[in-house]
Image (tube, rainbow, N blue to C red):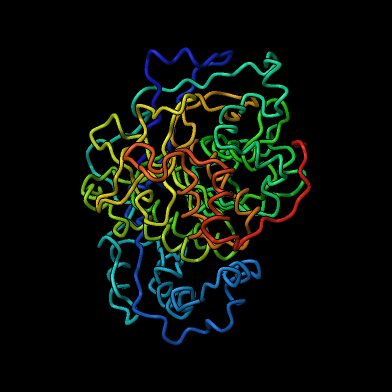
Amino acid sequence: MRIRCFVPQHDRNIFFTNAPMKRYFCLIFAIFTINAEAQNDRYLILLKDKVGSPYSVGQPSGFLSNRAIQRRQRQQIAIIERDLPVNPSYISQLAGTGARVLYSSRWLNAVLVQADTTIHKAIKQLACYKNTYRNGPLNATATYPLVNAGVQGSEVLQNSLNITQLTQNQANTNYGLAKKQVTMLGADVMHNQNYQGQGMWVGVFDSGFLNANNLRSFDSLFTQNRVITTYDFVDGNANVFDDDRHGTMVLSCMAANWPNVMVGTAPKASYALFRTETTASETPAEEAYWLFAAERADSLGIDVINSSLGYFEFDNAAQNYKYTELNGNKALVTKAANWAVGAGMVVVNSAGNERANSWKYIIAPADGDSVLAIAAVDSNQVITFFSSLGPSADGRVKPDLAAMGLQVAVAFTDGSIVAAAGTSFSSPLTAGLVAGFWQAYPCLSAIEVVRLMRQAGNHPNLPDNDTGYGIPTFTRAATAAEAYFNRKCAPVKTQKMGVKL
């Protein structure tokens, strides 16, 4: 479901507008527009084995890029049977039933198909068939009114911050309206050492990146060809710029590069933009899209994934997760996130915006044991009223870290800079910090980066259920890296300079 984006009534004057009010989902959590006809049902078919596969762990170039192979070699991560693609003959057998094959999953050994009930029955008779995930179509919706269809909680106003009247103090920092959110994490210190994400690849999973390819905030991202790839797993095409705006705002927290107006935490990284969400409905199919995107990211050689998404409640209440299932191993999307870390990527995810609601707690995949779940604090570093609580259902510290998530400056689709609220934005701010830190210490493994970022919080020895280990900074992370690993990783030597973005 969508993570609610809350702004209390008395705080709405923080947004200054010269444009009509717009409804805004702070954490999009929706699913492929459902056609009522049964042939549009999407089933995730689990297969028995990978026997007879033409692929081999000894020849990974058949399914992983050179960059992906090098990332694993650098981290001493073995390529195992789970990494092998689905047996092509099994895919052919599924197609032979009349099913439309959409995507296949290496890690789950599964295929997402579109089929009617008759075709699904035929699939179940195949020798390669093992099971159907959730025992039915992923996009099944209830016959009663959809839950949480529309804006959840308070309506958030998207209003323009005053770009032309920046204070001299803001202008002098290069960061403009983003000064507070960047400096809170010490990302300005990181940038001054010339760790701005150069050479790092970040995957962004979201609901769409409307008009991002036309905005001043991202001009260098596109003119320098640092958009690695784009793909819409919902609609099955490469265009991610014609759908929801949420991803545009999320991306700006990392990638914006508009000197003296707004600069993100990793303005010189490269980005892969994946749409795994839609605003039409809320079903478990989105968890499958997240899985497919994670595997695509793995194959490309992505370093860091930011996911400002979360799952626990669906249109069909029978499919909802219970809090007791948020144990790091139950939800499909959590399994996918853990597998992604196991493949050598760092996964940074919003903790959720459920504190003021009956659920209260973090949501999947923030419960993953290797996932960095990010809470939201205000500009005074005080936990916000909406940021989801920990711990995980099995008692682990969650969230892991926190960053600014109230009055966050983000790029909007009309070219303005707006203030927004939610863990949707504290997450990418942190993901950019992670990218720059890993750039500085490239010999670290993904799991080592996760551990060191936890140590970089401002209260690592007293974790709590609000902000976990606290608010990280680059300086504390660098200090922890050298101390913990006994200088295993001398940072890459770069010329220290003022930020020239």
The answer to whether residue 52 is above or below residue 142 is: below
Q: Position of residue 137 (x, y in %)?
A: 30, 57
Task: Specify the quadrant of the image occupied by residue 474.
Answer: top right
Rendered-image quadrant of the N terminus = top left
Nearer to us in this view, 447 or 95: 447
* Residue closest to the eye, 77 or 349: 77
Residue 51 place in picture, x, y as percent: 41, 85
Q: x%, y% of residue 314?
A: 29, 44
User: Residue shown at 33%/45% (left/top)?
Assistant: 363
* Vertical arrangement, residue 415 with respect to residue 39, above or below: above
User: Quick one: 457 or 387, which is closer to the camera?
Assistant: 457
> For this view, does 77 lie left or right of residue 45?
right
Of 259 and 9, nearer the camera is 259
Q: Is residue 25 visible?
A: no
In the picture, measured across the screen, residue 221 lies left or right of residue 463, that is: right
Q: Going 56% across and 31% down the picture, which residue do you hit?
A: 181
- Would residue 147 be visible to someone looking at this image? yes
Q: Residue at x 61, y 24 (%)?
A: 417
Q: Residue at x 33, y 43 (%)?
A: 362
